[in-house]
Amino acid sequence: MTTISAGPGAGAEPAGARHVKRPQPLRESVYEALTEMIIDGTLERGRHLVEVELAELLGVSRQPVREALQRLNNEGWVDLRPGFGAMVHVPADDEVDQLLAARAALESESARLAARHASKDDVAKLRELCRVGTAYQEAGDIDGTVRTNGELHSLITEMSGNRFLVDFAAQVDRRVRWYYTPVAPVRGAASWREHNRLVKAISEGDEDKAAQIMREHTEHTRKAYHDLQAADPAPEPSAPVQKRRRRTT
Amino acid sequence: MTTISAGPGAGAEPAGARHVKRPQPLRESVYEALTEMIIDGTLERGRHLVEVELAELLGVSRQPVREALQRLNNEGWVDLRPGFGAMVHVPADDEVDQLLAARAALESESARLAARHASKDDVAKLRELCRVGTAYQEAGDIDGTVRTNGELHSLITEMSGNRFLVDFAAQVDRRVRWYYTPVAPVRGAASWREHNRLVKAISEGDEDKAAQIMREHTEHTRKAYHDLQAADPAPEPSAPVQKRRRRTT
DNA sequence: ACTTGGTAGACTGTCTACCAAGTGCCATCA
DNA sequence: TGATGGCACTTGGTAGACAGTCTACCAAGT
């Protein structure tokens, strides 16, 4: 999304306020179902999405599907072509780079603000995540490592206390994770050493240092991506972009 | 009449009308019309927006209005409450601050990348904008100053070559301009001195310096906002948030 | 005075059906 | 081979219907 989500739920709720779970609007469920299918590859890049097909696939009418598709379009997951339909977005080669650059800026600033506002409690949580993450990494548990890495980063952005940074970072992060999953495990040990230094800087309230470390940290990730890119042969440069498919009925 | 003309379908086609540009989707026009009405205050903060009313006001059906409202919700202009409708967003008091902080991060990074990629042509344009802006400022032309200021900043973000930064910055910027227009003129001369230093840093390709100056520049704006806030009495602390209005028909 | 219960109206969320216009594919034709 | 015209398909937009839910309001009971 090119989009700031500041939905009604995002506002400050009173501490003990427990709202009863309300059934989500259908468009929301459709949106989630579609992003999930895009991320896990059920809907391949470049695939032609037809409203009616998605509608009957999900058991809803066209309307919620349209609304979900438009949101997906705004957030860059699909490209809407008037009169033709939606295609799952095919990332340009410089796109990952730009995403990672944007993430560097957002997370670096988050780290700065996190250092400014860190409470004792937050720092404790950060330390715990570092400990767990390092353990996973040493044990070779890739899944756990990646997950903990995500939790650490998202905790830091949330500690910034800035809704917009959180929002943008989350958006960028999902896109990044879709485009390229496989880098994180590559640079395991070094990554967690950096995390430790970062948490130390935050706990000391050293804003500049925290921001600096986070910037270098994300830059390293970007480098790692480039190295990976250079090593691997480019996968399918002439991807056969899926055109209109005849309906089988 | 606020009616959106739906293009060739609606009225009589002028004889020599050339169809060079295909008509924007209606939802797009509605989206623009609504943001404009929100920014210029026609739709006051907290106002309950009813789909049918907007629809007949703009001369379209419910669907395009719904779609526009959902986008506005995603971008934080209105709050959608399920089963009730949309209300024009009422900004929390810390919201402007957070927006400005996010903008600082985004524009600072943009300045860094702009310094990295600046072409001779870009630098020339920047210099020209500085010249024009300073002239406006000295002549006391507030309108021109504000406009040129906007052009300068948006040119710099575009020079970053990073689509995501451009996108996020544009979103944040529009929101900021809605919340508080009146600060820009307050700090005129200093602002343009900073612009000049910034352009110099960019032209020399000094990334760190450019980023640094831009950060300080936006921070100054934030300070100016705070000073203004402290001086002015808070306007309408207990704004009577508009609830459902009986239709007058 | 405060709560409870009930009622009415308004509006959204969703569905269905329908039509106009734009888009891409394909076969035909030069 | 290359242009062209037809055709199937899909979106964009409209209209109308209906259930569910939200608000406001009123009345009766405690």
Image (spheres, coloured by chain):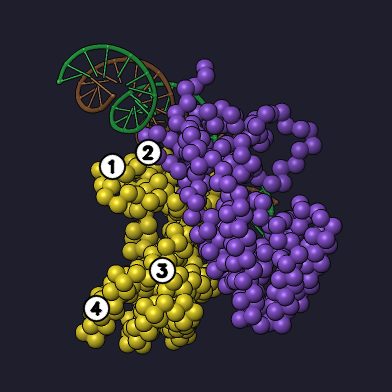
Chain colours: A yellow, B purple, C brown, D green
Camera sees residue B219:
yes
Circle 1 — which element? loop
Can you identify the residue that label 1 sits on? A22
Q: Amino acid at mark 3?
A: His
- Crowding around mark 4 (Cα neighbors within 10 Å: few <14, some 14 to 19, many 20+) is some
Can you identify the residue that label 3 sits on? A117
In this rendering, do the residues under marks 3 and 2 share a single chain?
Answer: no
Looking at the image, residue B151 sits to the left or right of residue B55; the answer is: right
Across and down, in percent, residue A69 comes to: 44, 49
Circle 2 — which element? loop
In this rendering, do the residues under marks 3 and 1 share a single chain?
Answer: yes
Q: Earlier in the sequence, mark 4 or mark 3?
A: 3
Q: How far is disc 2 from disc 4 in space, using C-alphas? A: 40 Å
Q: Above or below — where is A61 with respect to B124?
A: above
Q: Residue at x 44, y 71 (%)?
A: A116
- Crowding around mark 3 (Cα neighbors within 10 Å: few <14, some 14 to 19, many 20+) is some
